[in-house]
């Protein structure tokens, strides 16, 4: 029961991760700063998922990366590309639309239950 | 800190050469970001624990699939295995029978001879079938594993037998199989077993079929029924007839159900085998005269057995053949 619920929640969140990460990349971020940003908004993401995800987004040309070697340790910064901004806007619209739809459904669910 | 180096090595060694350097650098800077100044081993362990098993982190990075055969090819893979494996097993069995049983020298004593044949089939025969099946499994798996890794399309849906995307039109090329028309696997294996037994017996008839009597405590063949030289002289048409029989069985295996076309092929098959049978049975000297004489003496017959045996055999063969043809058409014509 506990296990099933856990895996269902993970599944539910997985799709939203890309959106969460993209939304924080309007300004350049490196791996750990992104983790902190997300945690501030209490979005938890496995680090082992986040870093590979960033690389995938780069490969899909949604984000661009650059190495900053001016500081004590080199850091790889990621920032949205133009294409990434475009996709983010569309994803956001889609997310808002589907949450509204789902909310309606869930309300209906409560309504049915009390009938 | 050595633990970090080893961790990074464990992740990158699973990745393609060209992305290793960049990922290693990024991982190291990330790990050091998380760690405080002057960190202890305990703190390193905590961070690495959060990053998780290097194998699963590497699999997240990797674009290569972490499975041998994925959902796109799996259905086609299993379908192909189910078709090819029994065919390979059957062919191996036949080659084995042809190689070993036909060349079987014939023991003086039928009992020990039969036991030797059974041991040969159970032992070597089973072994050669198993190794052929393993080979088939290996090569088909290898081909699909390579396909899985070289397919650049991002499609995930299973492929159809035509290697294209599925459309409802694909359904038109499939038959709807009814229970009455269905050809069972038992039927197929029965036919093949019968052919195998026939080959074994035909080419060893003078060692196997005849009058047996107990001589000096041993059961021995004293008068063989058939003249092996006459049987052997028909080898060419027997082989042709057998090839037709085997081809028909394989066609049944693929068709999976009776159709009018299959019924017609069944008729042709029966006509061929009947002609072959009549030609062989009516040959002079096919059945040894000693055998007839022995039977005539035994039963105290006053007439010649020879002609009646030939006529009865032909009538019986025709009767069974016609029954089989009619049944084929009856099954082929059944409406859904």
Image (cartoon, rainbow, N blue to C red):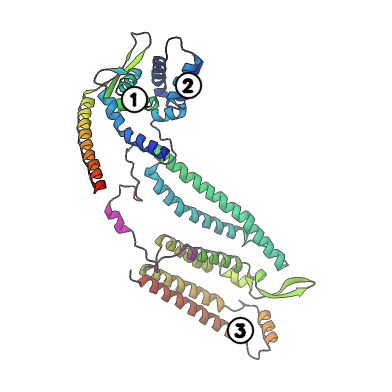
Residue B252 to residue A110: above or below: below
Farthest residue, direction right:
B216
Instruction: Say which element carries label 2.
Output: helix
Label 3: chain letter: B
Label 3 to label 1: alpha-carbon separation: 89 Å
Look at mark 3 in the image and give the residue it sits on. B306
Label 2: chain letter: B
Look at mark 2 in the image and give the residue it sits on. B7
The mark lying in front, picked from 3 and 1, is 1
Q: Quadrant of residue B97?
A: bottom right
Badge 3: residue crowd in 10 Å (few <14, some 14–19, many ≥20): some
Instruction: Say which element carries label 3.
Output: helix
Badge 2: residue crowd in 10 Å (few <14, some 14–19, many ≥20): some
Label 1: chain letter: A
Q: Quadrant of residue B117?
A: bottom right
Give the residue displayed 53% in from the left and 68% down from the top: B238
Q: Main secondary structure of the magenta part?
A: loop
Q: Quadrant of residue B65?
A: top left
The mark lying in front, picked from 2 and 1, is 2
Badge 1: residue crowd in 10 Å (few <14, some 14–19, many ≥20): some
Look at mark 1 in the image and give the residue it sits on. A55
Label 3 to label 2: alpha-carbon separation: 89 Å
Are both tags, 2 and 1, on one chain?
no
Instruction: Say which element carries label 1.
Output: helix
Q: Is residue A58 magenta?
A: no
């Amino acid at each position: 029961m506990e296990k099933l619920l856990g895996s269902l929640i993970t599944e539910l969140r997985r799709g939203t991760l890309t959106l969460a990460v993209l939304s924080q990349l309007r300004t350049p971020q490196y791996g750990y700063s992104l983790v902190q940003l997300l945690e501030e908004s209490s979005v938890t993401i496995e680090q082992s998922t986040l870093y590979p995800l960033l690389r995938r987004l780069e490969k899909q040309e949604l984000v661009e990366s650059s190495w900053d070697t001016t500081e004590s340790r080199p850091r790889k910064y990621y920032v949205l590309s133009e294409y990434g901004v475009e996709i983010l806007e569309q994803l956001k619209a889609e997310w808002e639309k589907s949450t509204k739809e789902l909310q309606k459904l869930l309300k209906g669910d409560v309504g049915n239950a009390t009938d | 800190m050595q633990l970090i180096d080893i961790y990074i090595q464990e992740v990158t060694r699973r990745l393609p050469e060209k992305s290793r350097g960049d990922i290693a650098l990024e991982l190291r800077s990330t790990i050091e970001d998380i760690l405080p100044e002057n960190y202890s081993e305990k703190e390193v362990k905590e961070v690495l624990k959060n990053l998780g098993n290097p194998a699963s982190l590497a699999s997240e990075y990797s674009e290569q699939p972490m499975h041998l055969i994925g959902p796109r090819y799996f259905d086609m893979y299993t379908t192909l295995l189910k078709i090819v494996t029994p065919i390979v097993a059957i062919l191996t069995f036949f080659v084995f029978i042809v190689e070993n049983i036909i060349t079987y020298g014939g023991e003086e004593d039928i009992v020990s001879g039969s036991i030797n044949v059974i041991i040969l089939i159970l032992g070597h025969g089973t072994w050669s079938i198993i190794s052929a099946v393993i080979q088939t499994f290996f090569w088909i798996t290898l081909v699909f594993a390579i396909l899985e890794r070289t397919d650049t399309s991002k499609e995930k849906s299973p492929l159809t037998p035509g290697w294209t995307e599925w459309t409802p039109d694909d359904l038109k090329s499939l038959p709807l199989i009814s229970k009455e028309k269905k050809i069972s696997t038992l039927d197929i294996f029965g036919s093949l077993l019968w052919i195998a037994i026939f080959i074994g017996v035909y080419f060893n008839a003078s060692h196997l079929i005849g009058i047996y009597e107990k001589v000096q405590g041993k059961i021995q063949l004293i008068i063989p029924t058939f003249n092996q030289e006459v049987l052997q002289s028909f080898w060419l048409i027997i082989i042709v007839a057998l090839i037709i029989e085997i081809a028909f069985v394989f066609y049944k295996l693929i068709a999976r159900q009776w159709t009018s076309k299959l019924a017609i092929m069944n008729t042709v098959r029966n006509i061929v085998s009947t002609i072959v049978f009549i030609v062989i049975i009516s040959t002079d000297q096919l059945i040894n005269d000693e055998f007839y004489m022995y039977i005539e003496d035994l039963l105290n017959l006053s007439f010649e057995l020879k002609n009646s045996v030939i006529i009865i055999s032909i009538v019986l063969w025709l009767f069974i053949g016609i029954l089989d043809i009619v049944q084929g058409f009856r099954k082929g014509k059944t409406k859904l």
